[in-house]
């Protein structure tokens, strides 16, 4: 992949500012002929390598066990994002990845660190919001996903969402 | 006499790793996500390997690093 992905860009900006980024490789939500369901650890590791290479992921990739223990502990959505503060508490959770949202959370954590370093106290302001993202796969992602997975994955997807257009 | 809480079977590997994406795999996941782990709570600890064979334990980063986790897959 020639382009720099939004997450790689953020990783580059924040990796030296007290942040660690990890991609957690979990089950295949749209299994098909090419990438079927995981049946064992070695196969899952190999799929995880393919995932890293195909998407050009630059941050470290962590592989969940075949039973999906960590995935299930965090809420089982296929493309969710969590940001965890230095104190080990969840600062941000999102059902789907939205890089502009992520960027604002990272910037806020960086600011809080800076203020603390200057001796200025900060306090948590609890925020709750709904964020809108496109329902349809945007920017050729649908072709990418189902091209990788195979025809069965596309057929299954259409069967589930056909009535919703 | 108190009603016994049903003992859920541990999820079998082939239920988590389903073969076909179906309506039931899609339904209810969003609500379950909203009601799971909340902002402000301790993130569940984990230890997972990287593809380089290093093991990463979340609790070992405590006090040192902010951590971003993006969950993902090929498909």
Image (spheres, coloured by chain):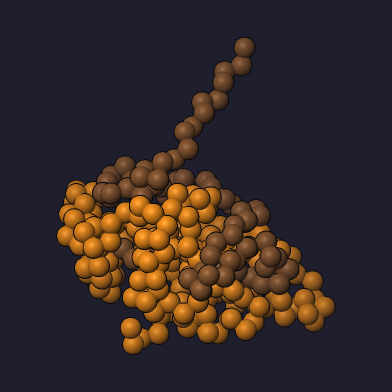
* Percent of width and height locating residue A84: 61, 64
Specify the farthest residue to the right.
Answer: A119
Is residue A96 left or right of A93 when viewed as pictured?
left
Task: Judge by depth and name the residue closer to the eye, A117 or B44.
Answer: B44
Q: In the picture shown, does residue A72 fall above or below A95?
A: above
Residue A37's image quarter? bottom left
Q: Look at the image and give the colour of chain B.
A: brown
Q: Look at the image and give the colour of chain A.
A: orange
Residue at 35% of width from left, 55% of height from top? A38
Q: In the picture shown, does residue A1 fall above or below B64?
A: below
> Does residue B39 show up?
no
* Percent of width and height locating residue B21: 28, 50
Q: In the picture shown, does residue B15 fall above or below A143?
A: above
> Does residue A64 show up?
yes
Residue at 27% of width from left, 46% of height from top? B22
Specify the farthest residue to the top.
Answer: B1
Count all numbered tags in the image, as a single digit: 0
Task: Judge by depth and name the residue closer to the eye, B39 or A52.
Answer: A52
Is residue A50 left or right of A11 when viewed as pictured?
left
Specify the farthest residue to the bottom.
Answer: A2
* Percent of width and height locating residue A142: 25, 67
Q: Dividing the image into 4 quarters, which one contains the N terminus of chain A?
A: bottom left
* Percent of width and height locating residue A157: 23, 54
Task: Judge by depth and name the residue closer to the eye, A130 or A39.
Answer: A39
Residue at 66% of width from left, 78% of height from top? A18
Q: Dividing the image into 4 quarters, which one contains the C terminus of chain A?
A: bottom left
Residue at 62% of width from left, 63% of height from top? B57
Specify the farthest residue to the front.
Answer: A42
């Amino acid at each position: 992949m020639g382009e720099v992905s939004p997450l790689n860009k953020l990783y580059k900006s924040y990796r030296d500012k007290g942040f660690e980024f990890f991609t957690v490789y979990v089950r295949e939500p749209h299994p098909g002929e090419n990438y079927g369901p995981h049946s064992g650890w070695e196969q899952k590791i190999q799929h995880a390598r393919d995932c890293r290479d195909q998407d050009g992921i630059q941050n470290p990739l962590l592989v969940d066990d075949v039973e999906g223990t960590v995935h299930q502990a965090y809420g089982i959505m296929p493309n969710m994002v969590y940001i965890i503060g230095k104190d080990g508490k969840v600062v941000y959770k999102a059902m789907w990845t939205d890089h502009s949202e992520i960027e604002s959370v990272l910037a806020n954590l960086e600011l809080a660190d800076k203020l603390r370093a200057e001796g200025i106290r900060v306090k948590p302001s609890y925020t709750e919001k709904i964020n809108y993202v496109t329902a349809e796969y945007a920017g050729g992602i649908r072709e990418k996903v189902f091209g990788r997975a195979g025809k069965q994955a596309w057929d299954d997807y259409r069967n589930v969402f056909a009535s919703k257009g | 006499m108190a009603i016994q809480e049903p003992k859920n079977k541990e999820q079998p590997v082939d239920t988590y790793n389903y073969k076909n994406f179906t309506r039931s795999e899609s339904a209810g996941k969003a609500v379950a996500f909203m009601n799971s782990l909340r902002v402000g709570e301790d993130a569940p600890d984990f230890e997972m390997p990287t593809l380089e064979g290093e093991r990463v334990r979340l609790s070992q980063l405590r006090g040192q690093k902010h951590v971003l986790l993006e969950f993902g897959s090929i498909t």
